[in-house]
Structure formats: structure tokens, C-alpha cells
Image (cartoon, rainbow, N blue to C red):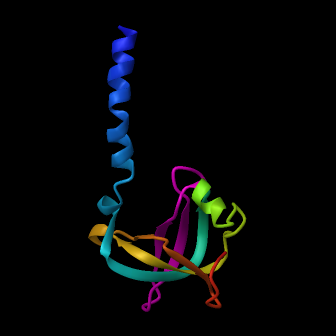
């Protein structure tokens, strides 16, 4: 019985993995944009790193945006570590925008306030 349950459980792993990595479920690849603001929180963990950025709109109101990036291995290959971006840093992020008006962006490119790329 354990073998049957284990076999059935393992057979669902590819479905779970594809559901997790459904980029198009969260982001619109045809809608590119950018945000800029101050980092409020850094979530440095798998499956993906997230930067929560406080964006000030033209009318003075604030919104909290979720900027999602690669996993820890991908980030470290680019030379990033948990201290590369910190709370309080001013950054600009460009990438695919969140679906259905959700305040999220896929962080394809990240820049410091002076315009230089974060490396």
C-alpha cells in the first residue's frame, strides 16, 4: 500500500512543478513596464526571491509592489547575495507586469536610483 501511495504521489510532482512555474498565470509577457521606489522588505529564499517596493504615485499615494526574481541559485550566479539589495534602498525595476492589474512585476532588470544596474 505504501508503494502504491508513493507511486501515485510521485506521479503528481510534475504537475505541481509546472503549476509553480506558470509564469503566464502571474505575469503578462506582452505588458512590459517599470516601477521605482524604496525597498520595504527582502524575501531571500526559494522558490523565488521577492523585493517588496513602496512606490509613490504622482498623486502622492503609496502602493506596495511585489517584485519577483529568480531562485537563490540563479541570483548567486549573477553575483547577488542576501545583502545586495537592502531595506531602504531606492531602486527601479523593469520587466513583465502582473496580470489583471495586480501590483507585481517580474524583475528582468534592476537598477539603482542613479541608473546603474544592480550587480
Residue at horizontal 49%, vertical 71%? 107
- Is residue 55 a member of the stretch shown in magenta? yes
Q: Which residue occupies the extreme front position in the image?
A: 77
Q: Is residue 60 above or below residue 66?
A: below
Percent coordinates x, y for residue 86 in the rendering: 68, 69
Percent coordinates x, y for residue 13 in the rendering: 37, 35
- Is residue 17 a member of the stretch shown in magenta? no
Q: Which residues are magenta?
A: 45-72
Q: Is residue 29 above or below residue 2?
A: below
Residue 105, quarter of picture: bottom left
Q: Which residue occupies the extreme right position in the image?
A: 83
Percent coordinates x, y for residue 4 in the rendering: 33, 14
Q: Which residue occupies the extreme top position in the image?
A: 1
Q: Does 118 sit left or right of 96 as displayed?
A: right
Is 6 in front, or is 44?
6
Q: Does 60 sit left or right of 85 as displayed?
A: left
Residue at horizontal 34%, vertical 55%? 22
User: Which image quadrant: the C terminus?
Assistant: bottom right
Residue at horizontal 47%, vertical 81%? 35
User: Which image quadrant: the N terminus?
Assistant: top left
Residue 92, quarter of picture: bottom right
| Numbered disc total | 0
Is 107 in front, or is 60?
107
Percent coordinates x, y for residue 65 in the rendering: 46, 71
Residue at horizontal 65%, vertical 91%? 114
Q: Is residue 66 above or below residue 62?
A: above
Amino acid at each position: 500500500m505504501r508503494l502504491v501511495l508513493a507511486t501515485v504521489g510521485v506521479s503528481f510532482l510534475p504537475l505541481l512543478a509546472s503549476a509553480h512555474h506558470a509564469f503566464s498565470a502571474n505575469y503578462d509577457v506582452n505588458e512590459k513596464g517599470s516601477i521605482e521606489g524604496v525597498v520595504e522588505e527582502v524575501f531571500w529564499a526559494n522558490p523565488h526571491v521577492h523585493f517588496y517596493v513602496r512606490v509613490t504615485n504622482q498623486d502622492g499615494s503609496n502602493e506596495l509592489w511585489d517584485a519577483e526574481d529568480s531562485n537563490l541559485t540563479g541570483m548567486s550566479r549573477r553575483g547577488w547575495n542576501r545583502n545586495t539589495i537592502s531595506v531602504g534602498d531606492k531602486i527601479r525595476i523593469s520587466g513583465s507586469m502582473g496580470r489583471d492589474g495586480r501590483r507585481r512585476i517580474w524583475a528582468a532588470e534592476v537598477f539603482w536610483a542613479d541608473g546603474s544596474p544592480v550587480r
